[in-house]
Image (cartoon, helix red, strand yellow):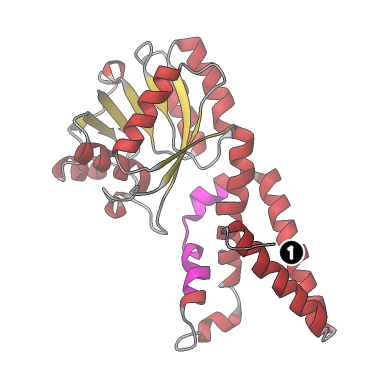
Amino acid sequence: MLIGVVGLGLIGGSLAKAIKYNTENTVLGYDIDLNVLLKAKLLGAVDGELTEEKIPECDMIITGLYPQSTKDFITANAAKFKKGAIVVDTCGVKGYVCEDMWETAKENGFVFIGAHPMAGLHYSGFEHSQVTLFNNASMVLVPSKDVNINDLEKVKKLFLSIGFTDIQLTTPEKHDKLIAFTSQLAHVVSNAYVKSPTAKEHKGFSAGSYKDLTRVAKLNETMWTELFLENDEYLIREIDGIIENLQQYSAALKARDEKTLRQLLKDGRECKERIDGEYND
């Protein structure tokens, strides 16, 4: 296949590298920063530039852009895509993207399948992209209800060939609800946690727990602001929920209520064990 990758940042650049390294497909790349495109060509991450003239030749186009930029690019080029071509996004929210893009695809004769790779780093940009970024990772696919099974299988086969070992199929609503908890809330909590004045004094007093909890505090604020606002309903629900839970611990400490505090900690431990399949009732 001739595959176009639009946006050669961490995800787009890693996808281009992984496809080039693991498959026989030809990869054309585009990035708003010409220096990034030149570097990608120099390193063999892409075979050439995805120009406007080349768009109609692509069998598949994968976007590695922010949600609004994804919609803008697909809408602007909808009439240029080859009839029957498959267009895949990699955005961290799906409700904001999929419904509109399914309609655009139907009107213009191409196929749109939402995708969200469950892999990443707390760094951004092509310089941090890795051919192995998706090894043993999960890929969430969000196809339309009337998707052609052959098109879906083609996308699944490509992603399995570049390192993904688990493919999940879901709806935009379920994706956004779960991602608000598994990803977005984690970034909010981590980002808020390091704002404690005590964080400035942690050297020599921190180990794995501090590192685990603060890793994603170092985020791309422009991208995450957009993602949070486009999934605000589910994320607000998760933030309010964790605040309510934390207030229970605070109240038990203020009251020096040993019994309640122990029960709260026990409940949390058992909840984690159930999630991990380690708990026997």
Number of other residues with Cα within 10 Å of mark 1, as a class: few under 14, some 14 to 19, many 20 or more:
few
Task: Provide the major secondary structure of the magenta segment.
Answer: helix
Q: Relative to the observer, which residue lies in front, 166 or 200? A: 166
Question: Which residue, given by chain and number where applicable, does mark 1 sit on?
Answer: 243
* Residues shaded magenta: 210-225
Give the left or right position of residue 32, taking residue 40 as reference.
right
Q: Position of residue 4 (x, y in %)?
A: 29, 28
Q: Is residue 187 above or below residue 193?
A: above
Residue 167 lies in magenta, yes or no? no
Residue flagged by tag 1: what amino acid is it?
Ile
Q: Position of residue 199 (x, y in %)?
A: 54, 80
Give the quarter of the figure containing the N terminus: top left
Q: Quadrant of residue 121?
A: bottom left
Residue occupying image coordinates x 55% and y 53%: 183
Q: How many marks?
A: 1
Residue occupying image coordinates x 28% and y 51%: 130
Q: Position of residue 93 (x, y in %)?
A: 55, 40
Give the left or right position of residue 170, taking residue 159 as reference.
right
Q: Is residue 181 above or below residue 31?
A: below
Give the left or right position of residue 238, taking residue 185 as reference.
right
Residue 217 lies in magenta, yes or no? yes
Give the quarter of the figure containing the C terminus: bottom right
Residue occupying image coordinates x 50% and y 51%: 222
Q: Quadrant of residue 152?
A: top left
Q: Would residue 77 be visible to someone looking at this image?
A: no
Residue occupying image coordinates x 37% and y 45%: 11
SS label for mark 1: helix
Q: Name, please, the residue furthest toward the bottom.
A: 204
Q: Position of residue 189 (x, y in %)?
A: 61, 64
